[in-house]
Every structure is written in C-alpha cells, then in structure tokens.
Image (cartoon, helix red, strand yellow):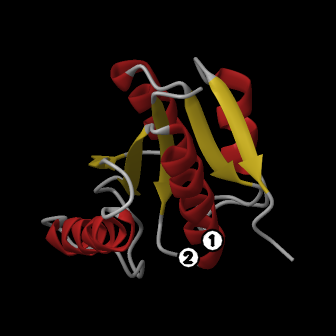
C-alpha cells in the first residue's frame, strides 16, 4: 500500500496524535516512517522560547523530540528522522519530494501554536506531491 509515510511533529498534542496515526499506518503497511521536526528560522522574534542566536537550543529540542519518537515507535517500524529549519508546511512538501514519500500525514490543526487552525494541513493538502491524510487531532 505505502512504502514511505511522512509526518511532522512539534511535540504538541495534535502533532503527537498525527505521529501515532502515521506510525500505526506504517506498521500495518510495512512502510518506512519519515518523521520531521521543523525548527523556526534563526530570525525567530525576540521573546520566543526558541530564540537562540546560535540556534542550538532549537536544534537540541528538535533532536530530543525526534529521539523520543524513535524510542517510542522504533520497535514496530523503520524510522528515519529529519531536523530542518523553515516553515513546517514547506519542510513537509520538500521532504516528500526528496524522499519520494507516498503519503503525508498531518493533523487538522497547525503544527504549532504559531499557526492558525489548519494552515499547515491546508498548505500541504494543496501543494503535496503525494497523497495527504488529514487526521482529526482535536476533540
């Protein structure tokens, strides 16, 4: 059915639920799970919790999150992780092209509190080079 399933996460509940659904699909179809964390660009505004002139704090947070995903789901599926800088939707679209993903899984909410409801899902659904599954991640 699928060979490569791509999902993005920022560690918040809705994105975590999308990762869980993507992992479930990957396990059932024998697909490789591609998990992306998108770090805000280094020009992040002052006062942002990810603001760090060197960018190291955001990298550390993202790498820690991806390591947690690998530990949680790695026993059941093959996982490849990506830590990128940029807009979450653009990162997912670019990775889908680069990795020849068959499916992108996104939540029905934005991937971060920085985005209004549905912006990432909307952008990905309109520009993805493959199928997109929008998972209901809100109650």
Q: In this view, does 35 lie to the left or right of 114?
A: left
- Number of marks in the rendered image: 2
Residue 32 position by quadrant: top left
Residue name at image x 46 percent, y 39 percent: 30
Residue at the (22%, 73%) spot, across then down: 52
Question: How far apart are labels 1 and 2 at the CA level?
Answer: 9 Å
Q: Left of 72 or right of it: where is 57?
A: left
Q: Nearer the viewer, residue 43 or 29?
A: 29
Using residue 66 as the reference point, say whether residue 121 is left or right of it. Answer: right
Quadrant (top left/top right/bottom left/bottom right) for the N terminus: top right
- Looking at the image, which is closer to me, 65 or 122? 65
In the image, is residue 120 above or below residue 66? above
State left or right for residue 42 relative to residue 16.
Answer: left
Q: Which of 75 and 108 is in front in this view?
A: 75
Q: Where is residue 29 in the image (x, y as percent from the top left)?
A: 54, 38
Of marks 1 and 2, which one's residue comes earlier in the chain? Answer: 2
Q: What element carries label 2?
A: loop
Location of residue 91 (image quadrant): top left
127 shown above or below 118: above
The reply to whether callout 1 and callout 2 are in contact (CB within 8 Å) is: yes
Q: Residue 38, image x and y in percent?
A: 39, 53
**Eye-nearest disc, 1 or 2:** 2
Q: Quadrant of the C terminus?
A: bottom right
Q: Where is residue 94 in the image (x, y as percent from the top left)?
A: 43, 27
Q: Is residue 88 visible?
A: no
- The tag on residue 12 is 2
| Residue plotted at (31% across, 62% down) | 74
Tag 1 residue: 113
Furthest residue in direction right, as rendered: 139
């Amino acid at each position: 059915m699928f060979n490569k399933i791509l999902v993005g996460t920022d560690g918040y509940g809705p994105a975590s639920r999308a990762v869980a659904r993507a992992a479930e699909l990957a396990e059932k179809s024998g697909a490789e799970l591609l998990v992306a964390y998108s770090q805000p660009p280094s020009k992040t505004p002052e006062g942002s919790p990810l603001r760090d002139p060197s960018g190291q704090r955001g990298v550390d947070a993202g790498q820690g999150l991806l390591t947690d995903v690998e530990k949680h789901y790695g026993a059941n599926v093959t996982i490849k992780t990506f830590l990128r800088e940029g807009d979450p939707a653009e990162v997912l679209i670019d990775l889908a092209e680069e990795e020849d993903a068959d499916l992108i899984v996104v939540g029905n909410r934005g991937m971060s509190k920085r985005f209004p409801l549905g912006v990432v899902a909307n952008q990905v659904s309109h520009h993805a080079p493959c199928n997109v599954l929008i998972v209901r991640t809100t109650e």
